[in-house]
Amino acid sequence: PGPGRPNVLLIITDDQRIESMGPMRKTRAWFKRGGTEYVNAFATTPLCCPSRASIFTGRYAHNHLVRTNADAAELAPRSTLAYYLRQDGYQTAIVGKYLNSWTGQPSHFEQWHTFENRSGYKNVPINSNGVIHRVKRYSTDYLSSRARALVRGFESQDAKPWFMVVGTWAPHTPANAEKKYRRTKVGGWAGNPAVFEEDRSDKPSFVQDKEAVFKGGKKLRTRQLRTLKSVDDLVDRVFGTMSLMGETGDTLAFFVSDNGIAWAEHGMKTKATPYFPAVRVPMFARWPGHVPA
């Protein structure tokens, strides 16, 4: 007989480029055991809202119509994973970031603990099932506790599978690390030819106008990688809770970023332009016995 319906866990980081998995040893270990790394993963659009809408719907931006970070309302609620899985009897929940400019309940999520109006690392407003409160603790740590509580709650209704999205703010700028990781060593970086490009006359004028240099790109990299240490803890704790509940073998889990970001390539420390640093993203899938290890 075929397997039952798996739980589905979707972890989405924010502005994490493909080369940034080094500090995330626990995450890589979990996905190595019973999972696959997709080394040629590309974001459809190197901008948060359009990319996330593509992840949630499987559609390109010209079809889901979320073309900018202000277009969240254009997303058709019945085109999303949450809608389809809820229709199929799944419990649905989301923790953290959904779509920029979205307020209130994310469509077809029965439980939610999402950033309200703005995201951040500390002292951010959170909408918890309709109640807005300010969270003073480090946001990645808060999201971790909420996600684990939801897993435990799901298992009290074991007859129904669950779908949960965990969307961190990390490693988005300003990339403020958790206190215990503020001085963590993350390894050196020598840049790449695009960082040291001397002649940008073949680039569009808006690219030629950028002035980021290697030193700034290296600093951004260091700050981002330090925030990812906390994301690594989140992944490990969520999987640890699933393991205690006996659910790791019954869960189809994904880890992916919405887009990357430039570390001074072509003078930029931004995204939104489809150079490789902004569109190549880390992507992993895990379901032991079903996804090749």
Image: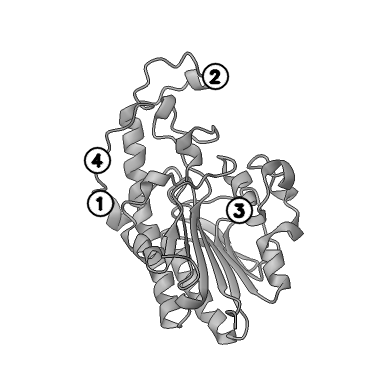
Which comes before the other along the chain, label 1 or label 3?
3
Q: For label 4, count other residues whose C-alpha is less than 10 Å away and answer few (under 14), some (14-19) or many (20+).
A: few
Instruction: Count numbered badges in the picture.
Output: 4
Q: CA distance from mark 1 to mark 2?
A: 37 Å
Q: Amino acid at mark 2?
A: Pro
Q: Is residue 119 left or right of residue 84?
A: left
Q: Quadrant of residue 246?
A: bottom left
Q: Secondary structure at mark 1?
A: loop
Residue 14 drawn above or below residue 246: above
| Position of the N terminus by quadrant | bottom right
Q: CA distance from mark 1 to mark 3?
A: 32 Å
Task: Identify residue for label 3.
Answer: 55
Residue 264 drawn above or below residue 162: above
Q: Secondary structure at mark 2?
A: loop
Which comes before the other along the chain, label 4 or label 2?
4
Please tell me which residue is depicted at 54% across the width and 83% down the height of the picture. Answer: 155
Task: Identify residue for label 1.
Answer: 184
Residue 150 drawn above or below residue 113: below
Q: Where is residue 174 shown, x and y percent of the image?
A: 42, 43
Which comes before the other along the chain, label 3 or label 4?
3
